[in-house]
Amino acid sequence: MRKVIYTLSIIIFTVSCSEYQKALTTDEISVKFNLGTELYDNEKFSKASRLFAQILPQYRGKPQAQKLTYMQAMCFYNTKDYNSASYQMERFVNSYPDSEKVEEVAFLGAKSYYLMAPVFSKDPENIKIAIDKLQEFINSYPESELINDANELIFELDYRLEFKEFNIALQYNVLTDYQASIKSFDNFLIDFPGSDLREKALYHRFDSAYKLAINSVVWKQQERIENVVNYFNSFKNNYKDSEFLKEMETKMEELVKLNNI
């Protein structure tokens, strides 16, 4: 019995492959459309996409074009080709603004940018683009049931962007480029005033200023020590019970000994 089932499976698979290969090489676009649709319905997205790519130009302006464009866009999305998916979905939204699928496609197109945004990267540009695309969706479809999903993605991207900016500033400290670190933390504190990383940013800004001061040439040291004092006071006023405060106070005592403040 098992041999019979196995043999039947091989036959079905062979026939299926043969049918697909014939569809790829035929000039009949209806054959490609029908088999592609069948493959799409069975979630064979990669194979369906190959057939759709061959016939999309011929169907432009025809009644089937909307369905075909939608299926091709979803094939790209489901095979994780988010770059192609975002492009195809934007084309769908622009070409078929009255479609019942337009809201779903607009959201998935914006989400594709979210999925392309790298989790770890020094360049935040892709994250900013993803945020803009999701915000465009929210602005275009303010009554959508997908608004909460879009907002959650923006919230995550905002934190990802915030975290990247924080780590860039911190990396300057590690590389002993203390002036760049101070400037980056200044920008971070301006750009993300309500950040959960604010306390750490203020601490590391102080630390960078402290290291810059103790390693300065004599004629620049006094001014830089005064900056450290200002950063320390700003931190202490905001975080009187911080775990960083004891270490910061120790460093301030070292500066007093160094320069008799």
Image (spheres, rainbow, N blue to C red):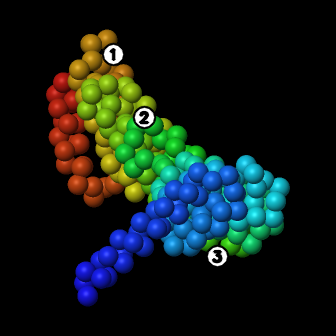
Q: From the viewer's perspective, is residue 11 above or below residue 28?
A: below
**Where the N terminus falls, by quadrant?**
bottom left
Q: Position of residue 258 (x, y in %)?
A: 18, 24
Closer to the N terminus: mark 2 or mark 1?
2
Residue at 32% x, 38% y: name it.
Answer: 170
The kind of secondary structure element at disc 2 is: helix
Residue at the spot of label 3? 145
Which one is closest to the eye, mark 3 or mark 2?
Answer: 3
Q: From the viewer's perspective, is residue 219 above or below residue 155?
A: above
Q: CA distance from mark 1 to mark 3?
A: 59 Å
Q: Which residue type carries mark 2? A: Ser
Residue 165: in sight, yes or no? yes
Q: CA distance from mark 2 to mark 1?
A: 21 Å
Q: Are marks 2 and 1 in contact (CB under 8 Å)?
A: no
Q: Which residue type carries mark 3? A: Glu
Residue 220, label in figure: 1
Q: Which residue type carries mark 1? A: Lys
Residue at 39% x, 72% y: name it.
Answer: 11
Q: Position of residue 100 (x, y in %)?
A: 74, 72
Residue at 76% x, 64% y: name it.
Answer: 64
The kind of secondary structure element at disc 3 is: loop
Q: CA distance from mark 3 to mark 2?
A: 38 Å
